[in-house]
Image (cartoon, rainbow, N blue to C red):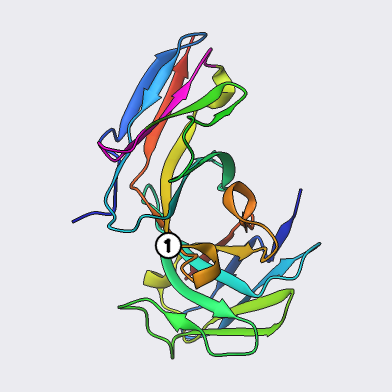
Amino acid sequence: AQKITQTQPGMFVQEKEAVTLDCTYDTSDQSYGLFWYKQPSSGEMIFLIYQGSYDEQNATEGRYSLNFQKARKSANLVISASQLGDSAMYFCAMREGSTTGGGNKLTFGTGTQLKVEL
Amino acid sequence: GAVVSQHPSRVICKSGTSVKIECRSLDFQATTMFWYRQFPKQSLMLMATSNEGSKATYEQGVEKDKFLINHASLTLSTLTVTSAHPEDSSFYICSARDPNRRGPYEQYFGPGTRLTVT
């Protein structure tokens, strides 16, 4: 089974609208971390937001929020008030296990290409 | 924030030659660095985990004799693609783990290196 599943290869949203990018994950670990990254055409990976498995509140970072539903194993990214500069590839990633235990590698989903339109 | 650099950003080499890519953590000591490969319009695939002072751990299916990784210091890891072939053309990205952080800022990505083998 895929550890990280992003079912939307491409999404369109109008400027100033909100958009939700889906991400589901699969792990048997109790301690894990979920990340969202933005990758523009330049290729750099830009960290957006993080949710720890023990965090009770949904993470928020400016216009980004993470809709964390632990029982459903989903970690959807919500971008509010979309801007033209938000057009990029978005990746969901998971780090399993505790960071102190050496389990630090990230597993990435296949990504969602977001295009913001006027 | 922490910065990770990669050099070169782009490289073109002839088939059969070797090319070295450097990954440096600029303001923290990275005991662990990760090397990813990304083909066009695809996700990041972890190639290997590089630990300072020890042998790298390669993911299944990655040829360790072809992709040589050296993590000789706490701020530098190198990836050497030996006897490169056109199918090795890809975007190579490194990330470095800050052992003093956990959660959102535990890993920092370099800007990537685009390798083209002719």
Residue A24 visible here: yes
Q: Hey, which residue is sitting farthest left in the picture?
A: A1
> Residue B100 appears in which quarter of the rendering?
bottom right
Q: A86 or A34, which is in the foreground? A: A34
Position in image of residue A22 (x %, y %): 32, 32
Q: Is residue B73 left or right of residue A41?
A: right
Q: Amino acid at mark 1?
A: Gly
The x, y position of residue A10, in whole percent, is 32, 30
Residue drawn at (42%, 49%) of the image: A93
**What range of the chain is rendered magenta?**
A69-82
- Residue A82 against residue A34 in the figure, above or below: above
Write down the chain letter for disc 1.
A
Which image quadrant: the N terminus of chain A?
Answer: bottom left
Please tell me which residue lies in front, A9 or B10: A9
Q: Residue drawn at (29%, 40%), measured in percent from left and top?
A: A73
B7 relative to A74 in the view: left or right: right
The reply to whether the magenta stretch includes residue B55 is no
Answer above or below: position of B40 versus A60.
below
Q: Position of residue A101 (x, y in %)?
A: 50, 71
Determine which quarter of the picture holds residue B61: bottom left
Left or right side of A110 for A106:
right
Residue matched to label 1: A97
Q: Which residue of the protein is positioned furthest toward the right in this rendering? A: B27
Q: Is residue B21 above or below residue A89?
A: below
Quarter of the view holding residue A54: top left
Residue B3 in the image: state x and y as whole percent: 74, 55
